[in-house]
Amino acid sequence: MATTITVAIEKGGCGKTTTVLNLADLAGNEARVLCIDTDPQGNLTYSLEGTRITDEEFTGHALYDLYNDFEKVHAGEKSVRDYVVETNLDNVDLIPASLETPKINTKAKELIDAMKQGKMDNVENLEYETQILKYFVSLVQDDYDYIFIDTQPSRDSLLVTSSLLAADYILIPAKSGSYAVDSAFRTYTYCNQLREQGIAAQKGVGLIQTMVQQSQAFNITRENYLRVLGNAVFRAQIRFGKAVEASEMAGMPVVEYAKTQPTAKSYVAAWKELKQILAESEGK
Ligand SMILES: Nc1ncnc2c1ncn2[C@@H]1O[C@H](COP(=O)(O)OP(=O)(O)O)[C@@H](O)[C@H]1O
Ligand SMILES: [Mg+2]
C-alpha cells in the first residue's frame, strides 16, 4: 500500500514543485509512483508532461473531473485510474491539474451538501469537503508505493487542507529568510492542529531547507528551524544551483539533467533520509 507524501508550505517559490518532481523521479527508479498536482497553476503537470494547463490537453480528465465524476467513481462506473496519465518519467504517473482546478472548491462543497441532504449516498461517511481527496487516494493506494501531492502556496485553502489530510507524511520545503521561517512555522502549526483535531492522521511532519547557499542568513535560519522543530529538520539540505532553472527549461528533473551537481546530490541525500524516516514511522 502506498505511502502518501504531501509537500506544502504557504509561501510560494520555496521549492515545493521542484522537490516533488525530483523526489518522485528518484522514487520512480525503485518503486511505483503517483503524483497529484493540486496547484491550479499546474507547474508539476507541465514539468512531468510538457503540457501547459492552457493547452487544455487534460481538460475533461484531470483532478477536477475526478471530483465532478464522484458518483460514477463511487458507483464503480469509472475508476480513479481513468484520470491518471503516464509521464515523461519512468514509473511515475500523474493526476494532472487543468484550467478547471479552481472549480474543485465549489464542486467539493456541492458533493458534501448533497450527501448531507440525503440526495446522494455517503457510504464513506465523508463529513467534510476536505476529506474527498483522501477517499480518492484510498482507491489507488494499492497500485503504488509512493504518492506525492504537490500543493499551491496557501495555508488552509480547500485543496491544501485536502492534501494535508490525505498525507501519511508532510514535507515542508523552506528557504532562508525570516518570511520563509514565519511561513514554515505557520504551516507546521497548522499540520499539527489538524492532527490534534483528529481530522488528519499524518505520522510525521518534516522540514527541509531548500535553495541553500552558505551565508549568515542561512546560519540564522537553520538555528531557528532547529530550535523550534528539532529532529523534524532534515539533515539533508537542498543546495541552490543554477542547474535547476536550466533543467526546468529542458523539461527534466535536476537529478537527471545535472546528476553531478550539488543540487542533484542533495536531492539524492534527501530521498534517502525521507525513506529512512518513513520506514521508521511505519515500524519497518
Ligand atoms: N535548489 C534550487 N536552486 C535554484 N533554484 C531553485 C531551486 N529550487 C527551486 N528553484 C527555483 O525556484 C523557483 C521556485 O521553485 P518551485 O519549485 O516552483 O517553488 P514552489 O512550488 O514552492 O512555488 C523555480 O523557478 C525554480 O527553478
Ligand atoms: Mg509549485
Image: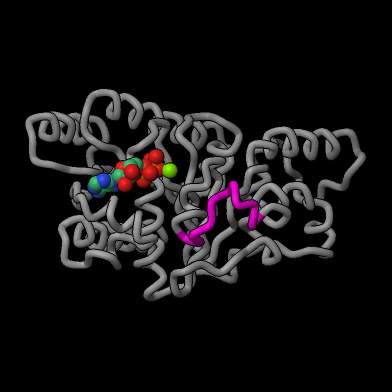
> Could you tell me which residue is drawn at 78 percent across and 51 percent down?
70
Image quadrant occupied by the N terminus? bottom right
Quadrant in which ligand 1 is drawn: top left
Percent position (x, y) of residue 195?
50, 37
Q: Is residue 249 visible?
A: yes
Judge from the rendering whether residue 224 lies leftward or rightward of residue 100; answer left or right: left
65, 1: nearer the viewer:
65
- Compared to residue 170, the image places residue 148 above or below, namely below
> Could you tell me which residue is drawn at 22 percent across and 38 percent down?
230
Judge from the rendering whether residue 211 lies leftward or rightward of residue 70; answer left or right: left
- Compared to residue 284, the image places residue 42 above or below, namely above
- In this view, the residue farthest toward the right is 119
Q: Is residue 23 visible?
A: no
- Compared to residue 117, the image places residue 1 above or below, namely below
> Could you tell me which residue is drawn at 16 percent across and 61 percent down?
261
Image quadrant occupied by the C terminus? bottom left
80, 255: nearer the viewer:
255
92, 223: nearer the viewer:
92
- Compared to residue 269, the image places residue 213 above or below, namely above
Percent position (x, y) of residue 61?
70, 57
> Could you tell me which residue is drawn at 64 percent across and 37 percent down?
102
Q: Which segment is the magenta one?
A: 48-58
Q: Is 99 in the magenta?
A: no
Q: How many marks?
A: 0
Find residue 272 and report its image quarter: bottom left
Find residue 125 and report its image quarter: top right
Judge from the rendering whether residue 5 lies leftward or rightward of residue 102; answer left or right: left
Colour scheme? one colour
Percent position (x, y) of residue 278?
37, 59
Percent position (x, y) of residue 256?
30, 67
